Image (cartoon, helix red, strand yellow):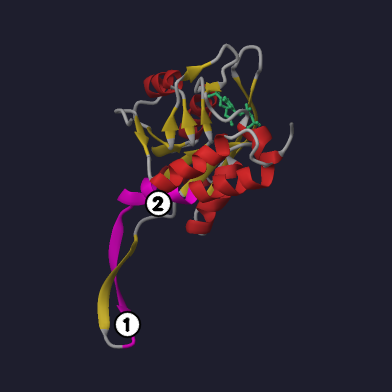
Amino acid sequence: MSNAAAKVIDHPLIQHKLTLMREKSTPTAMFRELLREISLLLLYEVARDLPLVMKEIETPLEKMQSPTLGGKKLCLISILRAGDGLLQGMLDLIPSARVGHVGLYRDPKTLEAVEYYFKVPHSIGDRLCIVVDPMLATAHSAIAAIDRVKAAGAKKIKFVCLLAAPEGIETFSKAHPDVQIFTAAIDRELNDHGYILPGLGDAGDRIFGTK
Ligand code: PRP
Ligand code: URA
């Protein structure tokens, strides 16, 4: 169920693919491919309000005014490393998008986000920035990433994930009330180790086969 801070994109194709991803028996290659497929479907919805401008073109029969995407190209920003699982499919849909990376890992004891890399295009202030990470758990990683992206000049930001915890949505929307969250599902709760229940486990490990 969507709420003010988070829009749930509950298309049947997304829900079906997400169920396959949650299954612990789903192998790495299939998990990665399902995430890529879902990323296309999520972006379709996230991009719904992109501005269009009319342009004159010539069909084989006559001239016409036809809509094209207006304004500067988007910037996709991946929170490493699991964000890269959503990035590639989105780039297939909008190949001219600029790309930024924020490298963060969660300290397993404190659950605080620790930054190890940051690189975004200079011109992000003029672009819609779509920050992607499959998991919004405590929200520490997403908040830290968006703090940095805003400090680098971004003004219009959307956050796209696959699964969100209610606790994470609440914390995130207090820190960044101007940033809308798009997610495929809102799960029940976090466990004592900050994992989403029922969830799908550690997204990075499942994408890259590191466990
Ligand atoms: C995972 C996930 C998010 C973060 C979410 O990354 O990809 O970035 O945890 O948790 P949070 O909302 O509590 O911050 P992880 O730290 O495991 O790093 P990885 O992507 O390198 O595996
Ligand atoms: N990060 C993950 O990869 N999975 C969770 O459930 C929580 C944080």
Q: Give the residues in magenta.
A: 39-60
**In the rendering, which numbered label is found on residue 149?**
none
Residue 123 lies in the magenta-colored region: no
Given the image, on which type of amino acid does mark 2 rest? Answer: Tyr
Q: CA distance from mark 1 to mark 2?
A: 27 Å
Q: Quadrant of residue 208?
A: top right
Q: Is residue 187 left or right of residue 121?
A: left
Q: How crowded is the residue under tag 1: few (<14 C-alpha within 10 Å), some, or many (20+)?
A: few
Q: Position of residue 58 (x, y in %)?
A: 32, 82
The answer to which of marks 1 and 2 sits earlier in the sequence is 2
The residue that mark 2 highlights is: 44
Q: Quadrant of the N terminus?
A: top left
Q: Quadrant of residue 64?
A: bottom left
**Is the Cβ of the residue at disc 1 closer than 8 Å to that at disc 2?**
no
For the question of whether residue 127 can be seen, the reply is no
Q: Position of residue 27 (x, y in %)?
A: 67, 42
Is the CB atom of the residue marked by disc 1 within 8 angstroms of ligand 1's nearest atom?
Answer: no
Please name whichever residue, 127 or 25, is drawn nearer the observer in this view of the structure: 25
Q: Position of residue 44 (x, y in %)?
A: 40, 51
The residue that mark 1 highlights is: 58
> In the structure shown, which secondary structural element does the residue marked by tag 2 occupy?
helix
Given the image, on which type of amino acid does mark 1 rest? Answer: Glu
